[in-house]
Amino acid sequence: MALKKIGAATAAAALALSLTACGGGAAGTTDLSNLKIGIKFDQPGMGLNEAGKYTGFDVDVATYIAGKLGTTPEKIQWVQAPTPQRETLIENGSVDLVVATYSINDTRKQRVSFAGPYFIAGQDLLIRADDTSITGVDSLKGKKLCSVTNSTSAQNVKDKVPGVNLQEFATYSDCVTALVSKGVDALTTDDTILAGYASQPQYAGKLKVVGKPFTQENYGVGLKKGNTDLCNKVTAAINDMIKDGSWEKAVKANLGPANYTPGPGNPPTPAACS
Ligand code: GLU
C-alpha cells in the first residue's frame, strides 16, 4: 500500500514536471498566465493610465493577445514603457511584451523581436490651432520642433528636414505642454498619438493636427529577441483579432472619439516571425 502511494506521488510529480516544461517552451521561461506588458501611460486613445484605469487601442490589443495566451485581464501587470526605454525593458525582463505605439525597424530588431504589424500609422504634425504658417513637413524652416528621444519620429524629421531645430523630450505629453506655452511651434510624431492629444477637452480650439502624414509607422509587439515561440503565438492572436472583428471594434472605440480613421494598409497582415 505504502509503495503504491509513493508510485502515485512520483507519477503526479512527473506529470507536473512535464506540464511545466511544456508551458515554459524551449525558447524562454515566459509564464503566459501572468504577463508584464509595457504600454504608454500618457497617450490618450492609445495607452493611458488614469489613476490605475488603463485605456487605449494598445491596451485593448495587449488585453486581447494576453487572453489568447491564457492571461485574464486582472492577471496583466501594466508597466510604463516610455519610448527611450522600450528595448531595455524587454532585454532585462521588466516586461514580457511591449504594445506601445512601437514602430518596427531594423535598428530595434538588433535588440528585440517584433510580432506584427498590428497597425499602420503615419508621422504628422500637431500645431497651435491659430497657426497658418505650418502646412506640412516642407514648411518647418525656422520653426521649433519637439519630439521624443530615440523615437522614429525624431529620426525621420532630422532626415527629412536637415538642420531642423528639434528639441527632444522624454515623453510626447511634455511636448504638448511646450506647444501650448509656445516654447515650441510643433510636435511631430504618429498621427494616432497627435489625434488623441488634439481631442482632449482642455485643448479644444487650441491645437490641431496638420493632416499630412509623411512616413509609414508599422506598429509591432516587442518581445525578447529570438523568442520565436512567443512571437508566433502573438502573431496568431493578432490575426485572430483582425479576423473576428475585435480589431475594428477597438479602433472605433479608442480612436473614433478623436475622429481618427486608419489610413491605407489597415488592417495590416502581420509578417512571419523570424
Ligand atoms: N512609433 C514611433 C516610434 O516607435 C513614435 C511613437 C513612439 O515613440 O512611441 O518611435
Image (tube, rainbow, N blue to C red):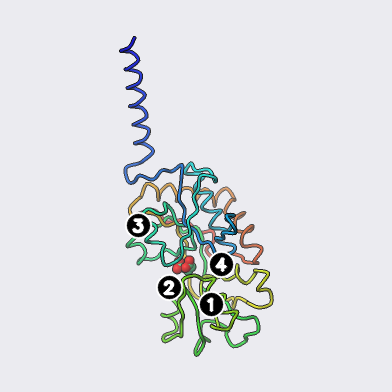
- Residue lying farthest top? 1
The three-letter code of the residue at mark 4 reads Thr
Judge whether 82 appears above or below 135 on screen.
above
| Label 1 C-beta lies within 8 Å of the nearest ligand 1 atom | no
The three-letter code of the residue at mark 3 reads Glu
Q: Secondary structure at mark 3?
A: helix
Residue drawn at point x = 64 percent, y = 57 percent: 253
Q: Quadrant of residue 9?
A: top left
Report the residue marked by disc 4: 192
Q: Secondary structure at mark 1?
A: strand
Report the residue marked by disc 2: 149
Report the residue marked by disc 1: 187
Local packing at callout 3 (Cα closer than 10 Å; few below 14, some 14-19, many 20+) is some
C-alpha span from label 2 to label 4:
18 Å
- Residue lying farthest front? 51
Report the residue marked by disc 3: 91
Q: Is residue 192 left or right of residue 98?
A: right
Local packing at callout 2 (Cα closer than 10 Å; few below 14, some 14-19, many 20+) is some
Q: Quadrant of the C terminus?
A: bottom left
First reached walking from the N terminus: tag 2 or tag 3: 3
